[in-house]
Amino acid sequence: MDEQIVQLEMTPKQLAMKNAVREFKNTHHYGPSVKELMLITGNKSSSNVVRILNDLVTRGHLRKGYGMRRAISVID
């Protein structure tokens, strides 16, 4: 059975985070770290960045490779 991912609408902060991940991966050919995303998006809390990333994964906008470093992909 095929698993369908339903992408839900994003908040402005989630959209900014998704775009930051996409641009970083396009430039560097690997995923950004939480610290790099903090600098790019202007977030001052690493836990806030992680929360937004996890929300985007739950909503079907990002995919994380668990157990691997910098393994994050944007789902379009």
Image: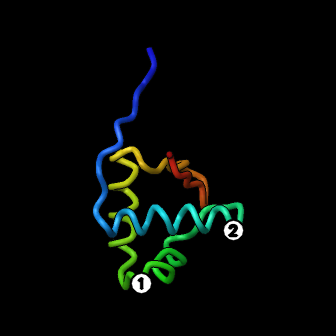
Residue name at image x 49 percent, y 47 percent: 63
The residue identified by callout 1 is 42
> In this picture, is 25 found above or below 76?
below
Q: Earlier in the sequence, mark 2 or mark 1?
A: 2
Q: Which amino acid does label 1 sit on?
A: Gly
Q: Nearer the viewer, residue 3 or 10?
A: 10
On the image, the x and y values in percent for residue 22 come to 56, 61
Please tell me whether mark 2 sits on a helix, a strand or a loop: helix
Q: Where is residue 61 in the image (x, y as percent from the top left)?
A: 42, 49
Q: Are marks 2 and 1 in contact (CB under 8 Å)?
A: no
46 left or right, relative to 35: left
Q: On residue 27, which mark appears? A: 2
Residue 10 pos. (x, y %): 31, 57
Disc 2 crowd rating (10 Å Cα; few below 14, some 14-19, many 20+) is few
Q: In the rendered view, tell whether residue 51 sits above or below residue 63.
A: below
Q: Give the Cα separation between the discs numbered 2 and 1.
A: 19 Å
Q: Which residue is drawn at 34% across and 47% down?
A: 58
